[in-house]
Image (cartoon, rainbow, N blue to C red):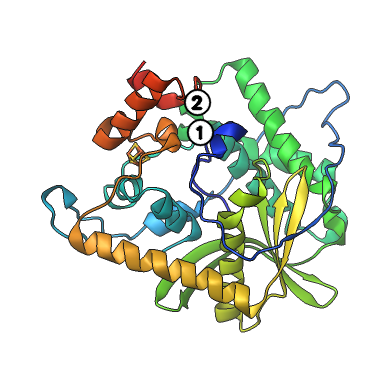
Amino acid sequence: MRGGPEPDVEPDVLDEIDDTLLPGYEPIEVGVPGDVTPPDQDGSMTLSVVSPDLEVETELVAAGAPGEVTSEDGEGVELPPHLSPSSASAFDHCPRRWKFKYVDRLKEPSGQPALVGTFAHRVLELLCELPPGGRTQETAKALARQCWPEMADDPEFAALELDDEGERAFRWQSWLAIAGLWALEDPADVDVVGTERKVSAQLGDVPFLGIVDRLDRREGQLVVSDYKSGTVPRLRFRGDKIQQVLLYAAAIAETEGELPDRARLLYLGQRIIDIPVTPRRLEEATGALGTTWDEVGTACSAGAFEAKPGVLCGWCPFAEQCPEGLGELRKRQANGNLPAHAPAKALVA
Ligand code: SF4
């Protein structure tokens, strides 16, 4: 799945993030980081691109959402038509930020890591749609070239204002993510059932919507796989990601009539987190989603969206419009614990 931007937060800063780790998970980790073959011997690479619709799950969720708002005067707002893993996670982290994005529809810039992920996802999607024998790194390079023009024309990419060196670094990061698949598995050996599958399902009381990166058949088992281009989070911060892929499994069961046996997070170039799908895990994941949905409902009917200030205010694009967030930034600035590379630092520096 592609989601909203994941801030490039230093590991020590991550310790302060109140993540929603699901209790009781002991994910099995398989695979080890492997060498990533550079695209060309001299390290250069010229990608070119075109991509069709690069749907992002969060955008799907926002699409069609009513958004007639106004919590400013305490009036309720309409519930969104769906909840996705990323919008649920966004609400859990900070309902105020969720409101800015999903109700007020304020633009949240993607940022380079998210765009790199979007590009890598697109190339891997096209690659895995090919017959197994065609899934080679040479083909992946060709697909990357094919897909580049659309990324280059994307206003979000233009907003990065990269110079030639920056653009080259972007392409290189993208390639490392794409080639990182071979560090985990040989895609030619994968029995792909489907890619980028949009799943809309009723999970308990929750109208769920998401996009499953890949559905595979492995030794008779149905497997949900989700690509991740970011760094593998520490164990205590993996709850969101594990919940996300379990929710995809639950939605696939609803829509396809077959419950996946395993759910996998493919951290490109790093490792696979492989989780057996069990009734208990599904119940916990859908239960947590239901709790968030209830909280979304309460907030929307009251038109009250609590601010949850914390370290991530430093990466919040709406900090300037959020008094609590500005207060948090000032406090951190005064205490010397606002990271120098936090974009919102400029508001209080
Ligand atoms: S600045 Fe902080 S508290 Fe305010 S919306 Fe953003 S994340 Fe939430």
Residue 50, visible in the rendered structure: no
Question: Is 331 placed above or below 292 here?
Answer: above
Place of residue 32 in the rendered image (x, y in percent of width and height, measured from the top left): 84, 47
Res. 120 visible in picture: yes
The residue located at (56%, 50%) in the rendering is: 2
> The disc labelled 2 sits on which kind of residue?
Leu
Asked whether mark 1 lies closer than 8 Å to ligand 1, one says: no
| Near-viewer residue (240 or 151) | 240
Of residue 282 and residue 209, the one placed in the foreground of this image is: 282
Split into quadrants, the picture shows ligand 1 in the one at top left
User: Considering only vertical position in the picture, is 95 above or below 80?
Assistant: above
Quarter of the rendering containing residue 349: top left
Q: Which residue is mark 1?
A: 111
* Residue found at the very far front of the displayed protein: 335
Q: Measuring from the top left, give residue 43's x and y in whole percent.
A: 82, 23
Residues packed near mark 2 inside 10 Å, few (<14), some (14 to 19) or many (20 plus) = some
In the image, residue 132 lies at what x, y percent?
A: 84, 60
Q: Tell whether 274 sits left or right of 38.
A: left
| Tag 2 secondary structure | loop
Q: Residue at coordinates 55% horizontally, 61% vertically from top-left?
A: 211
In what element is the residue under mark 1? loop
Q: Quadrant of residue 34?
A: top right
Q: Where is mark 2, residue-wise?
A: 160
Screen quadrant of the N terminus: bottom right
User: As drawn, is 317 to the left or to the right of 130?
Assistant: left
Whether pointer 1 and pointer 2 mark residues with C-beta atoms closer than 8 Å, the reply is yes
Q: Tell me the tag on residue 225.
A: none
Question: Which amino acid lies under the numbered mark 1 shown in the image of this protein?
Answer: Gly
View extreme (left): residue: 73
